[in-house]
């Protein structure tokens, strides 16, 4: 397969010296040498000739990094340039140019936008101005430290951050590539008359945060020793700080020991003059610390302050020393140790060279960046070619257990299997791992909390919809629906995704519950729910009946091995010779566990076991009530609360009869009942709500009057009195009914079809 050669634009303030400039230069040249159209826009600088000499295009916009109104002229100019030059990738590398680039990019029609990448190069002040560096469709973090900084301070999903360490040019930064003549030139310039003295080098811009003043204070503590300190960096760029350094040098009487060497165009040779190289950034950590890896590449040990990116590049005792920031004493101690053991220092240099050649080369950085370019460009191309590819975001309170949760998982899996992108936002839970294994992206936010704090999720959700180009927002529960709906309403109408709600229950009829009718389309999980929506809210337009379904692959008796059943039987202490009545479901009054226990008092058949399956820690107060009832009514020998079960197919096969006893409120659909039917089990359900549509009385189960323990007991007695063949026939009829009407596949197909019909309606087209 031929790889498409992209056109890539990088934007930064200038091309003088520094890590950002160096990485931009390395990448631009790499792209050009590999056949890509490589363009850099900047305010110019001393690196421009090298850039152009290597086949790159430089566009000079003098005010692109200037914090004045003059920079605003470039917004429209850049927009037009990106369109006319058919740019594939726009890579923004600094805050002010990033604002210009982002605003220009936003003005471009969606179908013509390039892919947008930002690189987070530093520990910028945490504010709305710096947040621009998180606006890329992908954000490059130059170190693990920077990645953590982004996640801790900005609302960015981890999956949108790509870690790409900076790197050095192995051809330039190699001791073997530096001639003795190059070293001689610098030695005569800086070290004339200082032969034999150890040399300590600190390269970097002369600025407070690079720590030149810290090194001066450190060297003042050991000024009785022989050494020469070289502070390499442009002395004219920051004259006030340069003057301050000169004053500190004079104050400590170090004029003959410390030299402000100025800008250097031959850093490889400069490093070879050094015995040790220092990275002293203290008031602010290095985001990555390119000086340290370049020095190690030249075989020099490094003393660095122990924070930021230096923690990832310098290995203490292996390639150098890490010292406490802002501590001249710690820095001085490390320098004394380094200068006092030449053999150890040389060994650290050798190890450092091997370490950085393995981990931090410019080639590796460029290869990873190019791979990211192709990845994100391919995603955009596919979306452009296939407008039927959707990004669906589902919202629900949590992902522990229950019908809503299972349906969310199944829909997510189906979307991914059919080439769509699935995002689920929830408060987390035990089903998250399975969701991710199935290919969905999970974003953890506590959107089910009925607390004002939940409102803080509105803007992050809005941002999530924008950044992921969500085409369908599917709301599945009331509180998350309110948060999602408000976030959706804040978007411009043209940018709003299709809004779908699923009416999963017989909610209290009030304004709070009415949110579930606010979708462009509303899914009713049963005829009962569809009628309820019309009767209580007068909504019938775009309300579609889509029965819930079960996964035929999971809920298949032939797929359950005997050992799975045996494990549960042993864990739950089931007597396999006695019939088992099973009531699965959350332990809550709505599910009717208390009614079931009351009915057992009236059951004439004495030879049975009852198992209540559901998380006993979810509702401890109600669990305690059930346990008290069991003890007081002498049911302990027959009834067990077995807790949560993560293998319900095996659990159903342990049962002889499965019950659904919801009475205070009907089941909207009754997913557990249908799952039991899929496993070939007869069911007893209360005769209201969705159960009236799934259970056929005395055909695949029994329907009993709600809140009537005697009626429930009568059906239990009738079921227990049947012989095995009769019960099996009930089970076969139940399986047949499920396969015809209630599969997850059918549910997912119909849901996706509904999404597409709503899209067609928005476009003024008739439904399929």
Image (cartoon, helix red, strand yellow):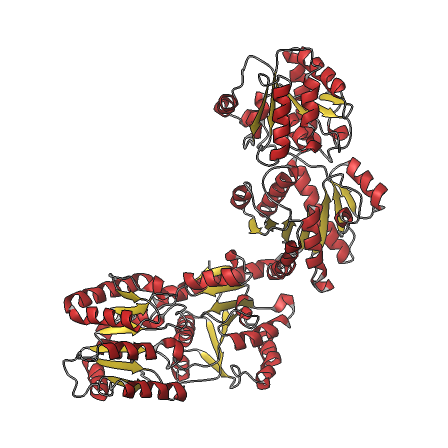
Q: Where is residue 291 in the image (x, y as percent from the top left)?
A: 33, 73
- Residue at 85% x, 46% y: name it: 538
In the image, residue 142 above or below residue 596? below
Residue 464 visible, this orientation: yes
Residue 698 visible, this orientation: no
Query: Going by the image, does 234 lie left or right of 616?
Result: left
Q: Position of residue 134 (x, y in %)?
A: 53, 66
Q: Position of residue 697 (x, y in %)?
A: 76, 21
Query: Going by the image, does 143 lie left or right of 552?
Result: left
In the image, residue 403 above or below residue 173? above
In the image, residue 38 above or below residue 640? below
Quadrant in the picture for residue 244: bottom left
Query: Going by the image, does 184 lie left or right of 68?
Result: left
Front-lying residue, 44 or 144: 144
Front-lying residue, 565 or 1: 565
- Residue at 64% x, 49% y: name it: 449
Q: Position of residue 439 (x, y in %)?
A: 54, 47
Quadrant in the picture for residue 686: top right
Front-lying residue, 308 or 691: 308
- Residue at 40% x, 66% y: name it: 366
- Residue at 15% x, 83% y: name it: 195
């Amino acid at each position: 397969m031929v790889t498409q050669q992209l056109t890539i634009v990088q934007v930064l303030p200038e091309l003088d010296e520094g890590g950002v400039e160096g990485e931009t230069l390395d990448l631009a040249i790499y792209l050009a040498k590999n056949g890509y159209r490589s363009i850099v826009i900047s305010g110019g600088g001393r690196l421009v000739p090298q850039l152009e000499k290597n086949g790159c295009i430089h566009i000079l916009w003098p005010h692109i990094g200037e914090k004045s109104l003059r920079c605003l002229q470039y917004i429209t100019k850049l927009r037009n340039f990106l369109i006319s030059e058919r740019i594939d990738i726009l890579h923004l590398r600094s805050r002010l140019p990033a604002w210009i680039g982002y605003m220009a990019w936003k003005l471009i029609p969606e179908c013509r936008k390039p892919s947008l990448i930002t690189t987070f190069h530093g520990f910028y002040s945490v504010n709305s101005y710096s947040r621009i560096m998180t606006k890329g469709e992908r954000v490059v973090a130059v170190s693990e430290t920077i990645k953590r900084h982004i996640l801790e301070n900005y609302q960015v999903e981890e999956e949108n951050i790509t870690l790409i360490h900076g790197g050095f040019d192995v051809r330039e930064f190699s001791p073997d590539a530096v001639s003795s003549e190059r070293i001689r030139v610098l030695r005569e310039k800086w070290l004339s008359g200082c032969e034999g003295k150890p040399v300590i080098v600190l390269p970097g811009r002369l600025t407070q945060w690079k720590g030149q003043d810290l090194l001066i204070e450190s060297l003042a503590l050991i000024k009785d020793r022989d050494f020469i300190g070289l502070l390499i960096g442009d002395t004219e760029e920051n004259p006030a700080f340069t003057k301050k350094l000169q004053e500190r040098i004079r104050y400590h009487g170090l004029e003959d020991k410390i030299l402000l060497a100025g800008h250097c165009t031959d850093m490889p040779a400069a490093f070879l003059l050094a015995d040790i190289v220092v990275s002293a950034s203290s008031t602010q950590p290095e985001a990555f610390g390119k000086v340290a890896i370049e020095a190690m590449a030249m075989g020099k040990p490094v003393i660095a302050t122990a924070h930021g990116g230096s923690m990832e590049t310098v290995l203490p005792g292996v390639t150098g020393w890490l010292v406490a920031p802002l501590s001249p004493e710690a820095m001085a101690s490390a320098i004394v140790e380094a200068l006092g053991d030449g053999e150890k220092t040389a060994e650290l240099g050798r190890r450092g060279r091997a370490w950085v050649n393995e981990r931090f080369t410019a080639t590796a950085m460029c290869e990873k960046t190019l791979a990211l370019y192709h990845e994100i460009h391919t995603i955009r191309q596919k979306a452009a070619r296939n407008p039927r590819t959707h990004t669906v975001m589902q919202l629900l309170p949590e992902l522990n257990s229950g019908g809503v949760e299972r349906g969310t998982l199944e829909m997510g899996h189906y979307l991914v299997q059919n080439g769509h992108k699935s995002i689920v936002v929830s408060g987390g839970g035990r089903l998250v791992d399975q969701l991710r294994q199935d290919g969905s992206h999970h974003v953890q936010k506590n959107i089910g909390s009925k607390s004002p704090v939940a409102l803080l999720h509105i803007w992050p959700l809005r941002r999530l919809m924008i950044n992921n180009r969500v085409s369908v927002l599917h709301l599945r529960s009331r509180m998350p629906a309110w948060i999602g709906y408000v976030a959706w309403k804040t978007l411009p109408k043209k940018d709003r995704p299709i809004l779908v709600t699923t009416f999963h229950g017989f909610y209290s009829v009030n304004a709070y519950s009415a949110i579930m009718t606010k979708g462009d389309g509303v899914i009713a999980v049963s005829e009962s729910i569809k009628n309820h929506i019309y009767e209580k809210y007068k909504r019938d337009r775009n309300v579609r009946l889509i029965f819930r379904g079960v996964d035929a692959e999971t809920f298949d008796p032939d797929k359950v091995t005997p050992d799975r059943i045996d494990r549960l039987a042993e864990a739950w202490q089931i007597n396999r010779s006695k019939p088992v009545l099973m009531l699965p479901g959350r332990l809550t009054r709505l599910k009717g566990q208390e009614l079931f226990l009351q009915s057992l008092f009236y059951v004439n058949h004495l030879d049975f076991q009852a198992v209540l399956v559901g998380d006993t820690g979810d509702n401890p107060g109600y669990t305690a009530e059930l346990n008290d009832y069991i003890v007081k009514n002498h049911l302990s020998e027959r009834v067990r609360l077995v807790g949560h079960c993560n293998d319900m197919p095996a659990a159903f096969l342990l049962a002889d009869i499965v019950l659904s006893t919801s009475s205070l409120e009907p089941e909207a659909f009754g997913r557990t009942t249908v799952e039991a039917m899929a496993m070939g089990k007869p069911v007893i359900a209360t005769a209201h709500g969705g159960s009236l549509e799934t259970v056929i009385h005395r055909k695949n189960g029994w329907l009993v009057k709600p809140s009537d323990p005697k009626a429930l007991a009568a059906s239990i007695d009738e079921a227990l009195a049947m012989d095995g063949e009769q019960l099996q026939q009930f089970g076969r009829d139940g399986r047949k009914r499920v396969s015809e009407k209630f599969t997850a596949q059918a549910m997912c197909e119909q849901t996706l079809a509904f999404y597409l019909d709503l899209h067609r309606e928005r476009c003024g087209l008739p439904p399929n």
